Every structure is written in C-alpha cells, then in structure tokens.
Image (cartoon, rainbow, N blue to C red):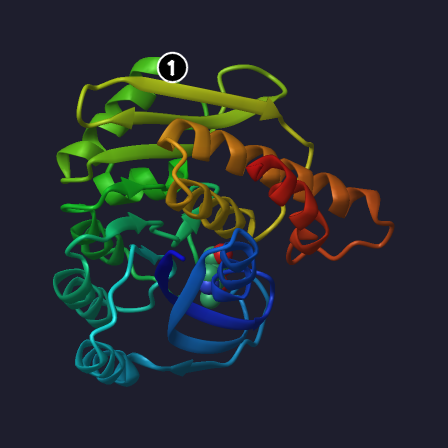
Amino acid sequence: MKRIMSIQDISALGKCSLTVALPIISAMGIECAVVPTAVLSTHTQFKGWTFHDLTDEMDPIADHWKQEGFTFDAIYTGYLGSFRQVDIVKRYFRDFGNGARIIVDPAMADNGKLYAGFTPDFPLKMAELLDGADLVLPNLTEACFLLGKEYRENYDRAYITGILEGLLACGAKNAALTGVSFEEGRLGVVSMSGENGNISEYYTERLPVNFHGTGDIYSSAAVGAYMSGMTIPDSLALAADYTVECMRLTLAEKDHNWYGVNFEQAIPYLIERMK
Ligand code: PXL
C-alpha cells in the first residue's frame, strides 16, 4: 500500500486542507499521514477564526518519523502559514523526499487576492518549494503571486504558456495551472511537462458559482490519482471531473452551505472513476 504525507493546516470546520486531503486520499486507497501545521476554528474566509500555530511540533514529528525509519511515496504540501513553516517543509523534503514524489499546492490566494493573513512577501518564500518538486498545482492567482506576474482576467494562450514556463523555471518538473478559461462556459487545467515541454489541457463545464475549498479537493484527488499510477494529465482531468461533480451535488442540495462543497457525496463517483 502506498503511503504519503500531507503537510497543511486543520481548519476544524470548513472542508479544506487536511479535512479534505485525508478522506479523499484514504478513499483512493492510499495511506495519508498528516503533519498538521496549525489548528484553526474555521478556514479564513469566515470572520473571527481562531488560530493555534503548530510549527513547534513539525521538527519533533520529523525527528520521530526518521527515528522510526518511515518512508513515504509522496509528500503533498498545501496551505502553510509562515516563512518558518516553509523552511521546515524544506527539511521534510530533504529527510523524506528521496524516492518520494513531491507535490506542492501553494494554497494562498484566489480571484486575484492573497488570503487573509498573508503578507505580500510570502509568495516568494512559498516559491522556494518549487525547486525539485515533481508537480506544482497553483491556480492562476497563486501562479501570478509566485512569479511576481500581473494577474489578468483576460488573457491568451501565450500568457498561460509563459506562466507555466515560469513555474518550471523555478525548478518544478511539471506544472499545472487550474482555473484557466479560453472559452465562455468552459473552465479547466493546463499543464506543462518540464521533460519535453508538452502541454496538456482539460476543460469541463464552468458552473456559475465559486465555492471555497475546491482547490484543495482538486489537489487531493489529483495527488491520489497520480500516486495510483495515472499520468499527470489523466490525474488532472480526473480531479477536474471529481471537483465538478462535488459542485454539482452541492448545488443540487437546497440550502447548501457556502463554505465548502459536498465532496463526501461524490466519493463513490471518484472511486468508480478510478476503476
Ligand atoms: O483552501 C485553502 C485554505 C486552507 N487553509 C486555510 C484557509 C484556506 C483558504 O482560505 O483559510 C486555513
């Protein structure tokens, strides 16, 4: 059985970060060890959230895992809260990255804006994690922040290709950009292989809503598919279909909540698609 670790926060309520990575990756038949970087009462799109930093636990967890001789097939990072956490994640890459795939979701921004709590100098620090990563999966906003590029709502293929090349130039072996649209009503993911420069694209119907937490659901499903042996383009396509299915099921529920999607109800779909 494959074993991966995921390093990100626990937003106790909110259906993002570890509270989606753990169930989704487990449902895909992969063991998911977790390194919780902080405990929040909710994700930061609510008001008045509490935050308890767990940075001081990160080195002792790594020390113990090393002592026990644990190895991992992948390290998947998501939302990180500080410069120090990024430095400790680099230590995890050094200590456990040998023979492991490294997948970085630089969860920190959306719709042209950094999430609450991040300072403008944080994205450049997060960009350090790209060096040597097997796959980086930012949304368009995050990619612009990582590269210090202007975020645009209207763009052409050359702009998207330039961003992908920029991500690879930071040292990632493969880059995938989510939330790309060249056509009204269609939304998708464009990826580039650093090995041969090949570009893959996959689009789904664009639903007329924006739900929170879909980026983490997308990345978790992509990690699970990739670690199950699927190619990167196939993993990205499956994750896109799963995310859309989660959103559809959410919309189908009258009085659905705004803070996260019904990813739980789409798990049978995900498992069926893995067959
Ligand atoms: O979904 C990304 C995410 C993860 N963790 C926390 C967040 C967010 C987005 O707002 O606030 C704590």
Image quarter hosting the C terminus: top right
**In this rendering, position of residue 108 left or right of residue 134:** right
Residue shown at 42% from the left, 43% from the top = 228
Residue shown at 16% from the left, 62% from the top = 90
Outermost residue, right side: 254
Could you tell me residue 189's position as x and y percent?
Answer: 45, 28
Could you tell me residue 250's position as x and y percent?
Answer: 75, 47
Q: Relative to residue 147, is residue 233 depicted above or below?
A: above
Could you tell me residue 208's position as x and y percent?
Answer: 69, 32
Q: Relative to residue 59, is residue 181 depicted above or below?
A: above
Q: Secondary structure at mark 1?
A: loop
Q: Say whether mark 1 is within 8 Å of ligand 1.
A: no
Counting labels gives 1
Quadrant in which residue 144 is drawn: top left
Q: Residues within 10 Å of mark 1 (few under 14, many from 20)?
A: few
Is 272 in front, or is 12? 272
Residue shown at 28% from the left, 20% from the top = 161
**Which residue type does callout 1 highlight?**
Asp
The answer to whether one can see residue 269 in this image is yes
Q: Relative to residue 227, is residue 13 depicted above or below?
A: below
The answer to whether one can see residue 150 in this image is no
**In this rendering, position of residue 157 left or right of residue 241:** left
Quadrant in which residue 236 is drawn: top left
Is 148 in front, or is 108? 108
**In this rendering, position of residue 55 left or right of residue 246:** left
Which residue is label 1 attached to? 156
Image quarter hosting the N terminus: bottom left
Residue shown at 45% from the left, 48% from the top = 224
Q: Relative to residue 71, is residue 149 depicted above or below?
A: above
Could you tell me residue 213's position as x and y percent?
Answer: 55, 53
